[in-house]
Amino acid sequence: MTPATPSGRPPGRPRAGIDAVVFAATLRTVHELGYAGATMDRIAAAAGVAKTTLYRRWPSKGALITDCLIDTFGPLPLKGVSRAEDISAAVRWGAARIAEPGVGAAFAGVFVDGMSDPALREILSKWLQDPYLRALRDTLGEPEDRVLLIIDITVGTLLHRMGMTGAPMVDADVTALIEMLLRQFVDDAGPKRGR
Amino acid sequence: MTPATPSGRPPGRPRAGIDAVVFAATLRTVHELGYAGATMDRIAAAAGVAKTTLYRRWPSKGALITDCLIDTFGPLPLKGVSRAEDISAAVRWGAARIAEPGVGAAFAGVFVDGMSDPALREILSKWLQDPYLRALRDTLGEPEDRVLLIIDITVGTLLHRMGMTGAPMVDADVTALIEMLLRQFVDDAGPKRGR
DNA sequence: TAGTAGCGATACCGATGGTAGCGCAATTGG
DNA sequence: CCAATTGCGCTACCATCGGTATCGCTACTA
């Protein structure tokens, strides 16, 4: 059992400051060597940290990358002025984050690792997607499945471009993407072409 | 040098029929064990073939998967009646293919492998994307960058849904995706909201 | 029948994700 | 200052995977 000192923090070695260093080293390594090239050994070396330290703090490579992405993305900045502006801001914000060095590759990499690993997919969905899903649902006042589709379209498109070309999406295409989303999910005068 | 017999095929063991068996075994294995779980050993075993045979026919795992996907997708069925119907048919066709067992996971897996391997990305882009890019460009009469964006949106969205949920996109969402694409790329009465 | 190209099997290599155990250093409470 | 505790670095290690080399053999063609 832990003695649970009154001052909260138990005695022992420092546990602050390492996360930030590791996150930075992770993105840097992924940016330079790609997702597969960013081995745990290399990330540890880049962070000036022992590999065992990584595994003492994160249960797997996927968990580390996911945590790194959560840290990088942070909270979604929404002003709540209008639905159009919120969607526009959210997409531009996501595009800018994914365009940061290493972020797109890390995202896509952990994403596919999750396809073979339900546990990792659970982590991804719960800790990375759900917070934004809830924030958007509440701000936009849309049903959850509609917001989910918006997220799929936005993130999927940005990642696919990143993966196929190796470079982030140019601003003109981001603008077109936003325009398209607004037509469908904001203007929305009902289905124009029924079936 | 190869003797180059007049009848075309040089002497030796049969080389027909193996590809189809391997492709089927590949998708089956990916479907059952995920992309990472589908090792070359297991694919070979599932196909009843030696691993050396795989490497004699495909230079890498990524190349095998890509070839398998090319074989699965085949030519894009376009009637050329109207742009709306062509886009709609193309998206539904892609959604149906990606929904087939193993196809979505294989696609996403080789996609991310490509992010760390420019040579594989070249293969992917040239042999899997370019044919559809050209076909759509000619049929739709759209500039290449616009078609590229349509492909990013379609494939990216379908793969993202598949990756996050583990299941293919339901028909209602595919319909909404198509409707959105048509509003943006067919109706297109010019930008409705300037900047 | 003879020659040839491809197949199966085995053994092997380097790299990678992940683990175990040890000594030690940093922090806190007394 | 001292002692207890906790986490860190280091080394060694394991199983697995992508990929290669080699060899005997077999199915095909001329």
Image (cartoon, coloured by chain):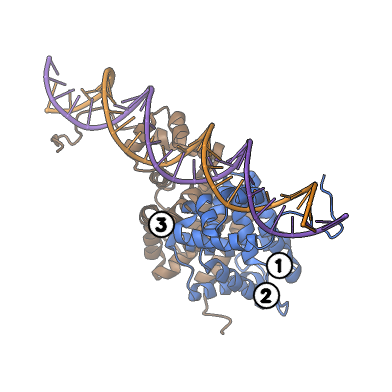
Chain colours: A blue, B brown, C purple, D orange
Determine which of the numbered discs, if any, sits on residue A86 in the image: 2
Determine which of the numbered discs, if any, sits on residue B129 in the image: 3
Q: Which numbered disc, 2 or 1, marks the residue that appears first in the sequence?
A: 2
Tell me what residue is drawn at x 69 percent, y 64 percent. A132
Which one is in front, A111 or D11? D11
Say which element carries label 3: helix
Q: Position of residue A109 (x, y in %)?
A: 53, 54
| Chain under disc 2 | A
Asked which quadrant contains residue A179, the reply is: bottom right
Discs 2 and 1 carry the same chain letter: yes
Check disc 3 and give the amino acid type.
Gln
| Chain under disc 1 | A
Asked which quadrant contains residue A139, the reply is: bottom right
In the image, taking residue A126 as reference, residue B143 lies left or right, namely left
Q: Position of residue C19 (x, y in %)?
A: 62, 38
Check disc 2 and give the amino acid type.
Asp
Determine which of the numbered discs, if any, sits on residue A136 in the image: 1
Which one is in front, C12 or A139? C12
Tag 3 near tag 1, CB within 8 Å: no
Tag 2 near tag 1, CB within 8 Å: yes
Q: Quadrant of the N terminus of chain B?
A: top left
Q: Is residue A160 visible?
A: no
Q: Position of residue A155 (x, y in %)?
A: 58, 63
Tell me what residue is drawn at x 50 percent, y 70 percent. B185
Discs 3 and 1 carry the same chain letter: no
Check disc 1 and give the amino acid type.
Leu
- Label 1 Cα neighbours within 10 Å, binned few <14 / some 14-19 / many ≥20: many
Tell me what residue is drawn at x 40 percent, y 44 percent. B71
Distance from disc 2 to disc 1, alpha carbons, whole Å, reads 9 Å
